Image (cartoon, rainbow, N blue to C red):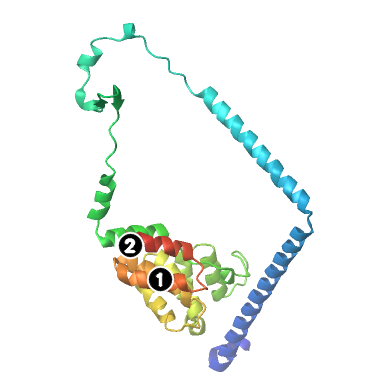
């Protein structure tokens, strides 16, 4: 009877979905409360430990570390092969004649000190290669080196894969958390409208799309999130939009987004953002 009513009564179906969402929210809240209790307990345990005992433990660890390092260095020196100088009488005079000069590094001779000076590597070579790359090529390299889907404790689902009776929303959350982004994207596209329109879930969907090289679809969602500063992922959306602009070679737009992101107190990836900003300024 309930299944029939859910099919024929949209209001009842909507109420049931709201109920499921409320239950999920309560589970998350309880999980956070439990984590907070564990953190408080750890702090209390740390405070209860005598200071002298902690200092002695650190001192012992330091001594053991130094002793281990000395042993490693001695063993390394003992195992290194020893090269004895070859006698001049054993040198074949023909060696200097038959050697291919193209395979021998050219050494400069300092006549004032009678010393052989090895040539210094051309440090400008790497800089030249870097300058010859287009902004888009540099941007794609920076994007590949720095992009990874966003994760925080709120995304951690209370259920795990393999549990029976998971809802479509829980399956989507578990797939995302466990890094199965192709399944997560497919699962999101099956969610009811009430969940699919939730911009917090859509942010996770955008992360999965970027991982699947569907950045053009993801950026539409990120721009939508950036319209409302009250949203949970408003700040983090700026970081990923900056990454997208870097990939496109639009460094000026990316600089503005990264500068805004770094200055925001709720930004969680400031160090990575600073490195990115330095990378596109060079």
Q: Residue furthest front?
A: 112
Q: Residue furthest top?
A: 89
Query: What residue appears at the point 57 percent right and 26 percent down from the top-left corner?
Result: 75
Which disc, if any, is residue 72? none
Q: Check disc 2: other Cα within 10 Å, few if <14, some if 14-19, many if 20+.
A: few
Q: CA distance from mark 2 to mark 1?
A: 12 Å
As drawn, 2 above or below 48: below
Q: Are discs 2 and 1 less than 8 Å apart at CB?
A: no
Q: Nearer the viewer, residue 14 or 117?
A: 117
Q: From the viewer's perspective, is 68 left or right of 192?
A: right
Query: Does the rendering let one see residue 186?
Result: no
- The mark nearer the N terminus, 2 or 1, is 1
Quadrant position of residue 27: bottom right
Query: What residue appears at the point 72 percent right and 67 percent down from the top-left corner?
Result: 40
Q: Which x, y percent locates residue 47?
A: 76, 60
Q: From the viewer's perspective, is 178 left or right of 34?
A: left
Q: Which x, y percent locates residue 83?
A: 43, 18
Quadrant where the N terminus sits is bottom right
Quadrant position of residue 94: top left
Q: From the viewer's perspective, is 56 left or right of 84?
A: right
As drawn, 239 above or below 192: above
Query: What residue appears at the point 47 percent right and 78 percent down from the top-left corner?
Result: 234
As drawn, 94 above or below 42: above
Quadrant where the C terminus sits is bottom left
Which disc, if any, is residue 259? 1
Q: Which residue is mark 2?
A: 281
């Amino acid at each position: 009877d309930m299944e029939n009513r859910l099919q024929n009564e949209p209001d009842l179906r909507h109420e049931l979905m709201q109920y499921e969402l409320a239950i999920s929210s309560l589970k998350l809240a309880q999980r956070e409360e439990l984590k907070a209790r564990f953190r408080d307990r750890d702090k209390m345990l740390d405070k209860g430990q005598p200071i002298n005992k902690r200092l002695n433990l650190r001192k012992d660890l330091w001594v053991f570390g130094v002793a281990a390092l000395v042993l490693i260095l001695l063993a390394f020196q003992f195992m290194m092969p020893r090269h004895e100088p070859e006698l001049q009488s054993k040198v074949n005079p023909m060696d200097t004649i038959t050697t291919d000069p193209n395979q021998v590094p050219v050494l400069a001779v300092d006549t004032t000190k009678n010393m052989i000076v090895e040539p210094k590597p051309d440090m400008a070579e790497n800089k030249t290669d870097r300058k010859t790359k287009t902004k888009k090529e540099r941007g794609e390299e920076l994007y590949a080196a720095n992009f990874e889907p966003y994760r925080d404790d709120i995304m951690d689902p209370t259920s795990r894969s393999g549990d029976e009776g998971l809802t479509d929303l829980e399956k989507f959350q578990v797939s995302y958390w466990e890094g199965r982004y192709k399944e997560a994207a497919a699962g999101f596209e099956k969610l009811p409208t009430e969940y699919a329109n939730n911009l917090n879930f859509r942010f996770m969907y955008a992360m999965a799309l970027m991982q699947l090289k569907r950045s053009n679809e993801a950026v539409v969602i990120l721009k939508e999130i950036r319209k409302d500063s009250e949203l949970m992922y408003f700040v983090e959306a700026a970081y990923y939009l900056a990454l997208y602009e870097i990939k496109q070679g639009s460094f000026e737009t990316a600089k503005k987004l990264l500068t805004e992101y770094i200055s925001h107190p709720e930004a969680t990836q400031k160090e990575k953002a600073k490195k990115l900003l330095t990378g596109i300024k060079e």
